Amino acid sequence: MAIEWIIYYGDDTSFTNEDGAPKDAPRGNVQCVAYADENAGRVVLAEQDYYCWDFKDKVWVPHNFGGLLQYLRQLGVQKIVLEGYWIKRERYAALHNKATSDDRLPPMSGELRDGPDVNVSPE
């Protein structure tokens, strides 16, 4: 089995899909979540209050409190929520650097999505 995602914790530990299912992951003190992406190589989610498992797309999704409430209101869907936690900036920076350079996942390619450009400027 290849590593598909990694959760990085404030105590410098990590948990991957090889360690267990999303439901088995420790829930608190989450600093970053990184996952392999076919377009971007690697995506790093960071500085969020909550990270929720999307059972349909099999990926972690970052949420603030409002997003968490929407996630929890989904009917008929099992929920898994990880909680972010504040740590000193220096420790966080080291963990974020680890998440962006960890050789257990493919390198970032710089391309986040495949498809047409989205024009958000007024016409």
Image (tube, rainbow, N blue to C red):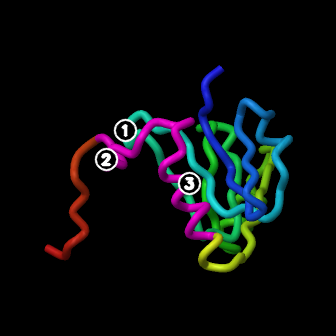
Amino acid tagged 2: Glu
Q: Is residue 13 above or below residue 19?
A: below
Question: Disc 2 marks which residue?
Answer: 111
Q: Is residue 69 above or below residue 111?
A: below
How many numbered discs?
Answer: 3
Amino acid tagged 1: Asn
What kind of element bears circle 3?
helix
Q: Is residue 7 magenta?
A: no
Question: Disc 3 marks which residue?
Answer: 98
What kind of element bears circle 1?
loop
Please name the residue shown 73% across and 48% down the image: 14
Q: Is residue 101 magenta?
A: yes
- Which residue is situated farthest in the left direction here? 123
Tell me the tag on residue 31. Answer: none
Amino acid tagged 3: Lys
Compared across the picture, whether 110 is left or right of 103 comes to left
Instruction: Tell me where residue 23 appears, x and y as whole percent.
Output: 83, 42
Instruction: Tell me where residue 107 appears, x and y as whole percent.
Output: 41, 41
Please name the residue shown 78% across and 61% down the image: 11
Q: Earlier in the sequence, mark 1 or mark 3?
A: 1
What kind of element bears circle 2?
loop
Distance between mark 2 and mark 1 Cα atoms? 6 Å
Tell me the tag on residue 39. Answer: 1
Residue range corresponding to the magenta coloring: 92-114
